[in-house]
Image: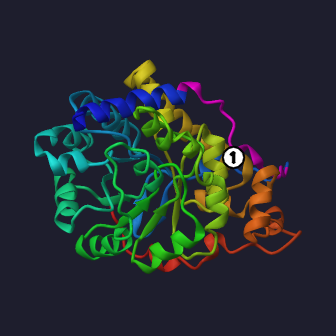
Amino acid sequence: MTSAQRKDDHVRLAMEQNRAHSGHNQFDEVSFVHHALAGIDRPDVALATSFGGIQWQAPLYINAMTGGSAKTGDINRDLATAAAETGVAIASGSMSAYLKDPSCADTFRVLRTYNPDGFVMANINATASVDGARRAIDLLRADALQIHINTAQETPMPEGDRSFSSWAAQIERIVAGVEVPVIVKEVGNGLSRQTVLLLRELGVRVADLAGRGGTDFARIENGRREPADYAFLHDWGQSTAACLLDARGTGLPVLASGGVRHPLDVARSLALGARAVGVSGGFLRTLMDDGLSALVTQLSTWLDQLAALQTMLGARTPTDLARCDVLIHGTLREFCADRGIDTGPLARRSGPLGPFEDVHDLHDLHDLTGSTR
């Protein structure tokens, strides 16, 4: 099977999975405490966010999806157009195909061609060379580099990697060898607290937690096997909500992606400490089912509704959502208990019931110096 065929298979299987998804995930176990007089005036609300030397117009981004075939190049063109029209950041899909076969460059380059002034992230895997990382950045004139780590996807992938011990050292070499901020992300199985702390030691600027709850790539790769004998890896890992709670106090800015279904999940993620929130499968489904115009409308609506939620909750900025009181329920609360995470202070951080919790723990404020477009 060619790389282009594999990329097209990924899109097809991801869409089948997205359409069959039940809709419930652990974001439903996070709720805001309603304070009826907390609201502010809509003109006082802003959506801009900054983290790790990066500044964005809004705390929402189109996360890594695809590229490498003619069909996926068309998808990337439309995603880039939607990003340009709404001002949200965008990440490429894995550029491994381009690094192996430069003839597919245009299927990725469209992300910059159709979004000339936007914030674009190139995406590579942890086995890429420093030279490969630079080539990916140069192709897109990328403002940041994503490195994805995905052992639970590679394991059932028929042609996947089987050697993982060198990944941390290679990430460190790439961080030292490129001139743009490096964001390390999972692909849907989550980053544990220990992993986030290690990434900080490696010099990584930002971690995208990318937890369980959205597209399940272990399930996709198992669906490509004959026989499909890795079903026991389906739903592997931690949810995005669990990862956000686990990563508190690590001193590294974190992004949230994986299982984000609507603007309330965006607000929940920001309240749990994310600096911005990414979506892949949900936006791809809108594009594939209803077209580019529908995706632009969806992105614009989400931004408007996020601003409405901030207005109701009294959060002038996305960062202020991390001062709002939230309750943790059900299996997510059990996860926190097992991991030694005290959720009580989250429910009383907004005022007289207790002191303000340090927003984003203040340990990573040193990362907010400098800026990237």
Magenta stretch contains residue 245: no
Decide which of 316, 221 is in the foreground and name it: 221
Magenta stretch contains residue 29: yes
**In the image, 41: left or right of 217?**
right
Residue 253 drawn at (x, y percent):
51, 68
Decide which of 127, 65 is in the foreground and name it: 127
**In the image, 263: left or right of 161?**
right
Bin the neighbour count of mark 1 within 10 Å (Cα to Cα): few under 14, some 14-19, many 20 and up. Answer: many
Decide which of 301, 234 is in the foreground and name it: 234
The residue positioned farthest toward the top in the image shown: 290
Residue 155 drawn at (x, y percent):
43, 51
Location of mark 1 (residue)? 27
In the figure, residue 192 lies in which quadrant? bottom right
Residue 12 drawn at (x, y percent):
40, 27
Q: In which quarter of the image is the C terminus?
A: bottom left
Q: Name the residue type under label 1.
A: Phe
Q: Which residue is drawn at 57% across and 79% down?
A: 363
Q: Quadrant of the N terminus?
A: top left
The residue positioned farthest toward the right in the image shown: 353
Secondary structure beneath dot 1 equals helix
Q: Which residue is drawn at 25% across and 56% down?
A: 142
Q: What span is colored magenta in the figure?
A: 19-35
Q: Residue at x 27, y 39 (%)?
A: 67
The answer to whether residue 54 of the structure is visible from this angle is yes
The answer to whether residue 296 of the structure is visible from this angle is no
Decide which of 26, 372 is in the foreground and name it: 26
